[in-house]
Image (spheres, helix red, strand yellow):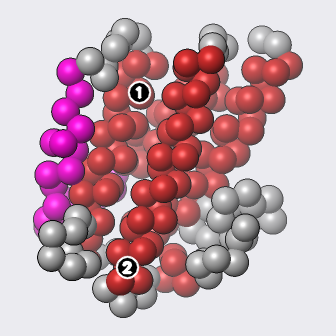
Amino acid sequence: MNAAVTVFQRALSKLLAEIFDGPPGDEAYLLNPGDAGLLGQLDSIPASAASARPMPGKTTIAAHVDHVYYGLALLNRWAGGETNPWGDADWSASWKRSIVTEDQWRLLRGNLRQAARIWQSVIKTRADWNDTTAAGALSSAAHTAYHLGAIRQILAAMNITCSAADSSTPGSNP
């Protein structure tokens, strides 16, 4: 593996770790130091809040989580050898789970956590990168970070305070 690939893998691994689990120590690129990241944030949200619409016609936190999980599941299928899992992907279906019970919410968060760990492992070990696969991998970080922000905006719109978000002050990290 060449040095550029190694640098790419380390950098993307850091970003994904930060998005999912919060910044390690003081090394923060997207979130503020001490932020719990997406998985910690989700663990602080009860199913009732995850199922609440911030306003009529808008989607729920549960739908955002299901959508992110679906995207990671497709990436993991691709990494597992499936040539084109996106060919028959139904992205609109990934937005349909909007209401969850506590058990469904726990399962959805567990599925997301497992998919994230698999994808993070792929990033650390894959040796064959080209322009398309690298851009796809980078987009997984950007896409997930976008949804973390959207989830936090939903919480703010509903005036819901959850402990994992308390350490993150919107706008304080350039």
- On-image quarter of the N terminus: top right
Instruction: Give the image location of residue 156, x and y in percent.
Output: 41, 83
Tell me the tag on residue 155. Answer: 2
> Which amino acid type is shown beneath numbered disc 1?
Asn
List the residue tagged with mark 1.
76
Residue located at (80% from left, 59% from top): 27
Residue 47 is at least partly visible in this image: no
Q: Are marks 1 and 2 in contact (CB under 8 Å)?
A: no
Res 89 quadrant in image: top left
- Estimate how packed mark 1 is, as few (under 14), some (14 to 19) or many (20 or more) residues with alpha carbons within 10 Å: many
The image shows residue 78, relative to residue 107, as above or below, that is: above
Q: Which residues are magenta?
A: 88-111
Residue 2 in percent (x, y) is at 82, 13
Q: Secondary structure at mark 2?
A: helix
**Which amino acid, by three-letter code, is at mark 2?**
Leu
Above or below, comparing residue 149 to residue 154 in the picture? above
- Across and down, in percent, residue 103 comes to 18, 62
